[in-house]
Image: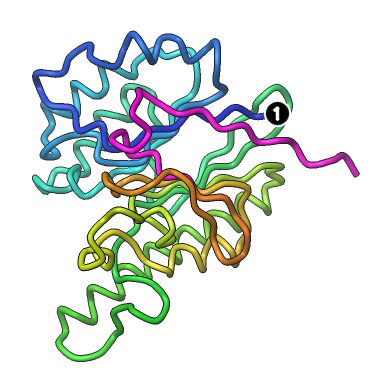
């Protein structure tokens, strides 16, 4: 059994030093990894990223994350990524990483993702250049996630997890105003997950949503935005596939 701790939307500012560290220090007792589903900072500044790094340095489990829209706000996402990487966090964007959990290879593929909406009520590549680029950017994020999942399968990962900030499904948006659903995620992420295969999908971003959802292909989806889970992290248990 693989124990996956996850949280998103912690929105740490410079006044939050030490806020989550006591809870994170307990991860070695209950989890095999910590996944961070974006919006780790309030405004995406280097100073805020350093606060996040302080919460994560030297934890008893590996930490893998993606950035969220807040982490891009100050146009310093490259620097934010570097600060987190220096603290030992594997920050993903269109790529993946492999962890060895007691002899089981666990692959995590990640992207921030983007909006656009869901099947039947989604934006299309038509009209003004800025509108077409909006949809193309979402498509590129989803394509990167799919390629990363495929690469992890080719490397022999026994368990695969898709990690995003934006939501791949509308299920976990229940409670959010319908008018903003197109800005909370995209069906393209779910298509990538179902097309390439995963055992679990984890996202954040939807503060007023719900925790549990599922893709059309039957992949479990969990919204781990901290306002939704109501704690420092949630833990999900994945049972290992049977031996051949």
Please give the name of the residue rendered at 33% of the width and 29% of the height, measured from the top-left corner: 230
Identify the residue shown where x is 61% and y is 62%.
196
The span picked out in magenta is: 222-244
Task: Using residue 19 as the reference point, say whether residue 45 is left or right of it.
Answer: left
Please, is residue 87 above or below residue 217 in the view? Answer: above
Q: Nearer the viewer, residue 86 or 35?
A: 35
Badge 1 element: loop
* Residue 142 image point, x, y percent: 42, 64
- Residue farthest to the front, as pictured: 175
Pinpoint residue 192: horizontal percent, then vertical percent. Answer: 51, 65
Residue where numbered disc 1 is placed: 1
Picture quadrant of residue 177: bottom left
Coloring scheme used: rainbow
Quadrant where the C terminus sits is top right
Judge by depth and name the residue closer to the eye, 216 or 243.
Answer: 216
Q: Is residue 90 above or below residue 193?
A: above
> How many neighbours does mark 1 have within 10 angstroms: few (below 14), some (14-19), or many (20 or more)?
few
Residue depicted at x 34% and y 57%: 113
Q: Is residue 212 left or right of residue 45?
A: right
- Which residue is at the far bottom? 127
Q: Is residue 81 magenta?
A: no
- In the depicted structure, whether residue 100 falls above or below residue 161: above
Instruction: Tell me what residue is drawn at x 29 percent, y 43 percent.
Output: 67
Q: Position of residue 46 (x, y in %)?
A: 13, 31
Q: How many marks?
A: 1
Q: Please indicate whether residue 149 sits to the left or right of residue 113 in the image.
A: right
Is residue 239 covered in magenta? Answer: yes
Q: Position of residue 164 (x, y in %)?
A: 40, 49
Q: Tell me the quarter of the image containing the N terminus.
A: top right
């Amino acid at each position: 059994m693989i124990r996956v701790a996850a949280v998103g939307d912690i929105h740490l500012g410079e006044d939050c030093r030490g806020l989550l560290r006591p809870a994170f220090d307990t991860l070695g007792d209950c989890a095999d990894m910590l996944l961070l589903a974006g919006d780790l900072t309030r405004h995406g500044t280097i100073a805020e990223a350093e606060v996040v790094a302080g919460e994560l340095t030297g934890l008893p489990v590996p930490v893998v994350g993606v950035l969220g829209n807040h982490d891009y706000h100050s146009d310093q996402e490259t620097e934010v990524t570097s600060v987190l990487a220096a603290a030992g966090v594997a920050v993903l964007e269109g790529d993946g990483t492999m962890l060895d959990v007691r002899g089981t290879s666990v692959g995590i593929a990640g992207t921030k993702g983007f909006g656009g909406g869901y099947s039947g009520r989604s934006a299309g590549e038509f009209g003004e250049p800025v509108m077409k680029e909006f949809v193309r950017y979402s498509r590129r994020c989803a394509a990167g996630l799919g390629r990363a999942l495929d690469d992890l399968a080719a490397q022999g990962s026994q368990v695969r997890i898709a990690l995003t900030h934006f939501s791949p499904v509308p299920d976990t948006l229940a409670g959010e105003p319908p008018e903003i659903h197109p800005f909370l995620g995209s069906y393209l992420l779910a298509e990538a997950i179902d097309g390439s295969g995963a055992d679990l999908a984890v996202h954040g971003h939807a503060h007023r949503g719900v925790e549990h959802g599922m893709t059309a292909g039957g992949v479990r989806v969990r919204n781990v935005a901290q306002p939704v889970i109501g704690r420092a992290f949630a833990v999900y248990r994945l049972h290992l596939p049977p031996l051949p």
